[in-house]
Amino acid sequence: MKSSRDSLRILTKDIVSCERCPRLRRYCAEVARVKRRAYRDEDYWGKPVPGFGDPQARLAIIGLAPGAHGANRTGRIFTGDRSGDFLYRALFENNFANQPESRAIGDGLSLTDAYLTGPVRCAPPDNKPSPAEFARCRHYMERELDLLSRVRVVVVLGKLGNDAYLGMLKDRGVIESRAQFPFGHGREHAIPKAPGLLGCYHPSQQNTSTGRLTAAMLRDIFARAREIIES
């Protein structure tokens, strides 16, 4: 019988080799070919990005999609851009990460009791996946969450991540309507037969540069997640 770690490793291979969304694959490949000037000497990942974290996690964190010059460059979710800088620092401050930053695969970062995933695995143009791309890709997130059998709370980063997760629960008959669980920063929902749900603004540069999401606000979200899983 395969362990969760082995099953996640197999799933990672499936994700990285995926070619289901031609528009996204063309865009990621073109970004990796042209590159941003600041990273012109680097080899871009340019492939779908798998989840990352502890197979025994009690906390699952759902984002949206890789950044064109972040995870699409580095190959690790929320790595190499401002969003990741905010996120991993908050995880470190709440003992979910062993270091406060994530620069590249092989930098020594590991997560404890937390796992990062998302409904879309390829960087989309203008950060806007189409509904069809969401639909084709979401099953990878579902498979990851099925393998993460110890999860007690799900933190959703932004309304689109929230809707994708609730859409999964609705399709599975766990909830009747997404409208029962409105998104809001710091808003909590208890869902029968599913982990608790905790909303958080996405740590996008737009949100963090305008002060809509501060480092303290993000730190407090994961402090609350820690309280829930330890209760």
Image (cartoon, rainbow, N blue to C red):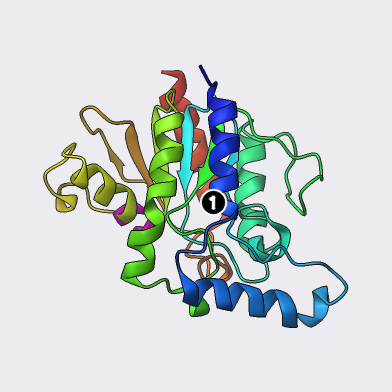
Q: Is the magenta region chiefly helix, strand or loop?
A: helix
What residue sits 50% from the left and 61% below the top? 65
In the shown orientation, is residue 106 left or right of residue 9?
A: right
Q: Mark 1 falls on what kind of element?
A: helix
Residue 108 sits inside the magenta stretch:
no
Residue under label 1, please give it. 15
Q: What number of labels is visible? A: 1
In the shown orientation, is residue 93 left or right of residue 225?
A: right
Q: Which of the image's four quarters has the C terminus?
A: top left
Quadrant of the rendered image containing residue 208: bottom right
The residue lying toward the viewer, choosing from 82 and 164, is: 164
Is there any visible trace of residue 77 in the rendered image? yes
The residue lying toward the viewer, choosing from 212 and 112, is: 112
What residue sits 33% from the left and 54% below the top? 164
Magenta highlight range: 158-163
Farthest left residue in view: 176
Residue 185: image x %, image y %?
Answer: 37, 52
Q: Can you say whether 231 is above or below 17 in the image?
A: above
Q: Can you say whether 65 is above or below 170 in the image?
A: below
Residue 85: image x %, image y %?
Answer: 67, 55
Amino acid carrying mark 1 in the image? Ile
Quadrant of the rendered image containing residue 84: bottom right
Would you call the spot at circle 1 few (<14 residues within 10 Å), some (14-19), or many (20 or more)? some
Residue 120: image x %, image y %?
Answer: 46, 59
The residue lying toward the viewer, choosing from 221 and 153, is: 153
Residue 88: image x %, image y %?
Answer: 65, 47
In the shown orientation, is residue 24 left or right of residue 95?
A: left
What residue sits 43% from the left and 74% below the top? 128
What residue sits 50% from the left and 67% below the top? 207
